[in-house]
Image: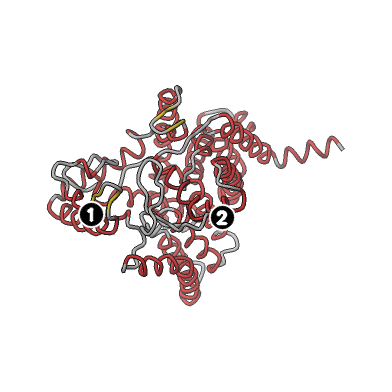
Amino acid sequence: MISKFIDYIKKNKYLIVILIGVILRLIWIFAMPTYPETDFMWYHVKGKEIAEGKGFLNGIYPYYTGRPGVPTAFRPIGYPGTLAILYFIFGADFMVAKLFNVALSTLIMFLTYKLCDKFFGSKIAFLTLLIFALSPLAIAYNSIICSEILFSALLMLSIYLFFNKNNPFIIGLLIGYLTLVRPIGVFIPTIFVLYEFIRRDVGLKHKIKYVAAFAVSVGLVIAPWMIRNYVVFGEPVFSTNGGYVFYVNNNDYATGSWSDPFKYPDSPMLQYKTEDGFDEMAIHKLGNKLAKEWIKENPKRFVELAFLRIANSYWYKTDDIMWALTIGINQWHPITSKAVKLEKLLYRPFYIVLFIFIIYAVVRFIRHRKIDFTTFILLIFLYFNAMMFVLEGNPRYVFPLHPIYTIGVSFVIINILKKLLPERFSAILS
């Protein structure tokens, strides 16, 4: 009996690592009294108000209390709507959202391991799981009421099903939901469509049918949101945050990351600011217009800012762990500065190794024209970095990709160790 149990543990040791990862996340959310600030308070309050039947309403910092009769589309409804369901069932408590994060993190760990095991083998899969399960950033994010973990879980589930069951209707529903969770995902459907079309193992007729079914199911999820916004704002806008972010990162005062457009000298945005907020639709339209004009007039500066945005996301601004350490409005836990230093120490090397993997994937694709999971990781990387290239440098855009990026990092580490270290080390991971 004992020997059978030991054999089971050996064969399924990844489950032990997942369990350890879950325990660490639970300890963190109960030990760290993270109080939602800025975006995270917005998510919580909007979810609470929807659960109470008040609607999806505009509100301002710091508590974002909805103003009756003033609807919002500043961010899509995906994450607040999900919180609303949870809050309606379990109550609008911070811990409900945090426990939901732990459940999603468990799913992410499982799917990441399974995907990596399928395409890269058990050694790389185990190291991938070990790194992600013990990752301080992946643990700390569980106490933040944020859309990143839900987005990451939906992305990993969509990818897992895409490379296993591959039912276009189900995957389309998931991707549609994902785009409503974070606006940066609005064009993610193109990755799945592109990959399906460059595959060599299926015919054109199959590809057309697949893409049609996929597009219909994505549309079914997004359409109600777009129709609502058409009724409310007179336009089927996806997010009124789009023009705002576009302008904030493409103007004479842009820094490659977020800055307050209302504080720019002679800011054109001030005409739409009021004591209790701002006209988000007017800001969205003006931001789009001004950003496009600025890019046309300043192409060189645009490119410089674009590369700065990438550098901010992976190097200069690797400080998003601090959002797990807010203990009140504008109040930070005493360990915040040390936690930020730890993040920079750990994740800057992580990203360097990631870029080595991306270079490998690019060279591999150009030389051998291989269309496989490595190619898909490359497409994911290119998509998100293209979005950051144009929009904003922010490590929070990178974090949801950590599971899939960790696969690439582990691939590089294992292959280097195979060449540099004795075979005995390889046996440790077998």
- Tell me if 257 is positioned left or right of 76 in this view: left
Residue at x 40%, y 55% (from the top left corner): 57
Q: Mark 2 is on which residue type?
A: Ile
In this view, 218 is above or below 123: below
The mark found on residue 300 in the picture is none
Q: Residues within 10 Å of mark 1 (few under 14, many from 20)?
A: many
Residue 3, image x, y percentages: 83, 36
Q: Nearer the viewer, residue 129 or 224?
A: 224
Q: The N terminus appears in which quarter of the rendering?
A: top right
Q: Nearer the viewer, residue 49 or 176?
A: 49
Q: Residues within 10 Å of mark 2 (few under 14, many from 20)?
A: some
Residue 72, image x, y percentages: 37, 57
Residue 426, image x, y percentages: 60, 33
Q: Residue furthest front?
A: 68
Task: State which mark lies toward you, 2 or 1.
Answer: 2
The quarter of the picture where residue 430 lies is top right
Residue at x 48%, y 77% (from the top left corner): 205
Q: Nearer the viewer, residue 402 or 420?
A: 402
CB under 8 Å between discs 2 and 1: no
- Tell me if 387 is positioned left or right of 364 in this view: left
- Tell me if 27 is positioned left or right of 266 in this view: right
Residue named by callout 1: 287
Residue 171, image x, y percentages: 53, 63
In this view, 301 is above or below 421: below
**Residue at disc 2, secondary structure:** helix
Sequence-wise first label, 2 or 1: 2
Residue named by callout 2: 85
Q: Residue furthest right?
A: 1
In this view, 336 is above or below 219: above
**Residue at disc 1, secondary structure:** helix
Q: Mark 1 is on which residue type?
A: Gly
